[in-house]
Image (cartoon, coloured by chain):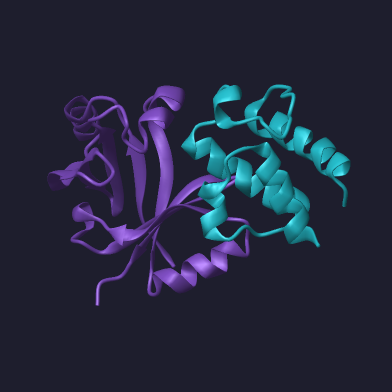
Chain colours: A cyan, B purple
């Protein structure tokens, strides 16, 4: 799975979780997305796990700094 | 795994308690402050059902954001389990994500609890049986 495909599917996940269209880049952080608080972050992770059929280690659930790291982790776990 | 209580998030604890008492609920346990989660908690019961009133006392409480977003409302069901770590492991496979790792809960006699969130269900609490 390449980054383009991950971003396409991830945009759909963000739309689902935050009820809005979100323009995602590697540098996007929680501060850029209204509603991306600690609780919605957990919902986001669960939705990503469901969409990509992956399971994040606990340290990664709270440890990712931006969308770029999330995409890297999805690709790593999908390999 | 059995249902232990329903968690009810409220802005004003004493007012909410009076509102439940008007419905016939009785206090099971007086107010306890959980300084780890920065919430005040009261347990009430009626007809064998237990309600946990939860009210954040600080803006950085773990549930302050949820209260601001959802208002006064039920927000989790707590399930009592024999083995907390095994239950978490099993639920991880069903897409539950741990939002609050196992820790002692002052309002539950120091028993370990954990909170998990499912993307299509919301929050659940797991409470480990004593002993």
The front one of B86 and A1 is A1
Q: Check the picture and name the quadrant holding the C terminus of chain A.
A: bottom right
Is any part of residue A50 visible from this angle?
no
Q: Residue at x 22, y 31 (%)?
A: B57
Return the x and y of residue B68 as percentages of the image width and height: 40, 23
Q: Quadrant of residue A16?
A: top right
Q: Residue at x 28, y 38 (%)?
A: B54
Count of picture labels:
0
The front one of B50 and B85 is B85
B30 relative to B78 in the view: left or right? left
Return the x and y of residue B61 as percentages of the image width and height: 31, 35
A61 relative to B29 in the view: left or right? right
B42 relative to B96 in the view: left or right? left
Q: Residue at x 37, y 36 (%)?
A: B63
Return the x and y of residue B45 as percentages of the image width and height: 24, 47
The front one of A51 and B40 is A51
Return the x and y of residue B104 as percentages of the image width and height: 26, 60
Please say if B70 is above or below B25.
above
| Residue at the extreme front | A27
Q: Residue at x 56, y 30 (%)?
A: A30
Please say if A65 is above or below A27.
below
């Amino acid at each position: 799975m390449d980054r383009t495909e991950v971003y396409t599917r991830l945009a759909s996940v963000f739309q689902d979780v935050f009820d809005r269209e979100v323009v995602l880049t590697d540098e996007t952080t929680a501060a850029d997305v209204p509603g991306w608080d600690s609780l919605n972050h957990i919902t986001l992770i669960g939705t990503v796990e469901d969409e990509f059929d992956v399971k994040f280690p606990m340290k990664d659930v709270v440890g990712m700094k931006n969308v770029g790291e999330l995409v890297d982790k999805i690709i790593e776990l999908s390999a | 795994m059995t249902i232990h209580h329903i968690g009810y998030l409220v802005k004003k604890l004493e007012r909410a308690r009076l509102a439940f008492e008007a419905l016939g609920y009785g206090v099971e346990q007086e107010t306890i402050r959980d300084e780890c989660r920065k919430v005040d908690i009261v347990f009430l019961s009626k007809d064998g059902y237990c309600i946990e009133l939860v009210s954040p006392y600080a803006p950085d409480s773990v549930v302050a954001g949820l209260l601001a977003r959802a208002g006064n409302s039920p927000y989790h069901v707590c399930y009592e389990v024999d083995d907390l770590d095994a239950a978490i492991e099993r639920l991880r496979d069903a897409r539950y994500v741990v939002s609050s790792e196992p820790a002692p809960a002052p309002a539950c006699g120091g028993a370990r609890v954990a909170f998990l969130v499912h993307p299509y269900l919301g929050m659940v609490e797991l409470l480990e049986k004593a002993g």
